[in-house]
Amino acid sequence: FSSNLDKANTVSKNVENPAVGCPGTHVDQISKDDAPTLAFPSISTSDFQFNHEKAADVIVEKVAEFSNKLGNARLVFVDLTHGSKILSLVKSKAAQKNIDSRKFFTHVGDITQLYSTGGLRCTVIANAANWRLKPGGGGVNAAIFNAAGPAMESATKERAQSLLPGNAVIVPLTSSSPLFTREGVTHVIHVLGPNMNPQRPNCLNNDYNKGCKILKEAYTSLFEAFASIVR
Ligand code: AR6
């Protein structure tokens, strides 16, 4: 894995002042809990109104496809509440498929506070973005842009002005972002999923042939982007 990630793992070991890192901490002392980890929310199933059952099938299919291609890296599916329907669906479908729980698991919590509040180290987090890659708009997008601060907004603009449905863009964070210093997050991957909400751009009007295809492309783009960071 890249020295960046090793550094981030080292960095996140120091809770008091994670940006400084721990002198004397070596890669071979890092436990399995420090494996590169991608935390991702359910793309398109809230504001974009995508069917939960169909989305859960896509998520588990794509996790099964990628979890063995990522070495010791881990994938974590996150939602805010224990009552989350999509979280329960994904959990039970992953168990049915016998997906290795060391490589994939679910977690309840705010994706912007996984380490500080949940004690879960995630080096990379995914965002369910809008096509203009703009802050705000509610949901996980607003939470991530707020938590990451202006540095992520300008780093995002440097890399892309917009996204097509099914695509992803990687944005590296630096110590100017609280997500990096507080949570140990080195990269945010913005993903644009398919939209079934008539109030939002590019509505697919319940065309689930197109919708499922685009949602699969979105998770493929996300997991390939994570793989490229981990490599
Ligand atoms: N931490 C973890 N999960 C969250 C958080 C959080 N802080 N906030 C929401 N979720 P959504 P979409 C979960 O609506 O359907 C935005 O306004 C939430 O419970 O954020 O892809 C963008 O600007 C749900 O399971 O994304 C786009 O315009 C999941 O995140 C549009 O909404 C995704 O919900 C994208 O809509």
Image (spheres, rainbow, N blue to C red):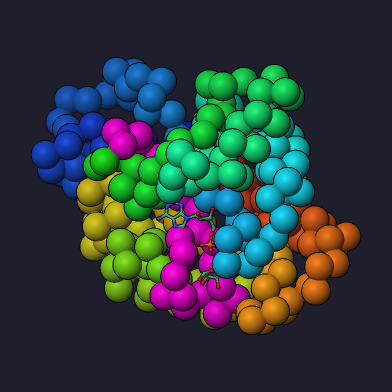
Residue at 41% x, 75% y: name it.
Answer: 136
Q: Residue furthest right?
A: 209
Magenta residues, dominant SS class: loop
Look at the picture and state if 64 lies above or below 130: above
Instruction: Say which quarter of the image contains residue 89.
Output: top right
Residue 199: name its quadrant: bottom right
Check residue 136 for magenta coloring: yes
The residue sitting at the left extreme is 16
Image coords of residue 142 (percent x, y)? 41, 68
Region of the chain picked out in magenta, as a range = 118-141
Residue 226 as seen in the image, left or right of residue 1: right
- Measured as percent of width and height from the top left, residue 175 is found at 24, 56
| 70 to the left or right of 184 | right
User: In the image, what residue occupies the spot 26% across and 41% down?
Assistant: 117
Q: Which x, y percent locates residue 97?
A: 74, 24
Q: Residue at x 67, y 73 (%)?
A: 197
In the image, 53: left or right of 210?
left
